[in-house]
Amino acid sequence: MKQVNTNLVNWAVVCVNEFARHRRLSPRDAFQYLQNFGGIEFIKEHYEAEHLLSWDDTVEDLGIVCRNNGGSL
């Protein structure tokens, strides 16, 4: 169980950085945006499926989740 949590944390950090890169945001701004609009919760809840996808697909999914929760990027 501990290894899964470590993998999730490491993967989540990369998700935030990839989202930031794709959206031309700082990692801090990307994290805040994802936190405010449900992206971080989505990362935690859907790690098992999302970590198997490409970074482009994951970033796209995060964008959809955030837009559905009021985000405007």
Image (cartoon, rainbow, N blue to C red):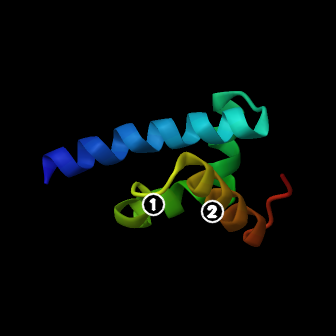
Query: What's the residue at 69%, 59% (across, down)?
Result: 37
Q: How many marks?
A: 2
The residue where tag 1 is placed is 50
Q: CA distance from mark 1 to mark 2?
A: 9 Å
Query: What's the residue at 74%, 72% (across, down)?
Result: 68
The residue at the far left in this view is 1
Q: Nearer the viewer, residue 35 or 56?
A: 56
Residue 53, relative to residue 22: is it above or below? below
Question: Residue 8: x and y, percent?
Answer: 33, 48
Q: Horizontal placement of 28 versus 67: left or right?
A: left
Q: Nearer the viewer, residue 43 or 49?
A: 49
Question: Residue 2: x and y, percent?
Answer: 15, 47
Query: Which amino acid lies under the numbered mark 1 shown in the image of this protein?
Result: Glu
Question: Residue 36: x and y, percent?
Answer: 68, 54
Q: Secondary structure at mark 2?
A: helix
Residue 64, relative to residue 34: is it above or below? below
Label placed on residue 39: none
Q: Nearer the viewer, residue 65 or 36?
A: 65
Q: Quadrant of residue 31?
A: top right
Query: Which amino acid lies under the numbered mark 2 shown in the image of this protein?
Result: Asp
- Kindly check if marks 1 and 2 are in contact, taking CB atoms under 8 A apart as contact: yes
Label placed on residue 61: 2
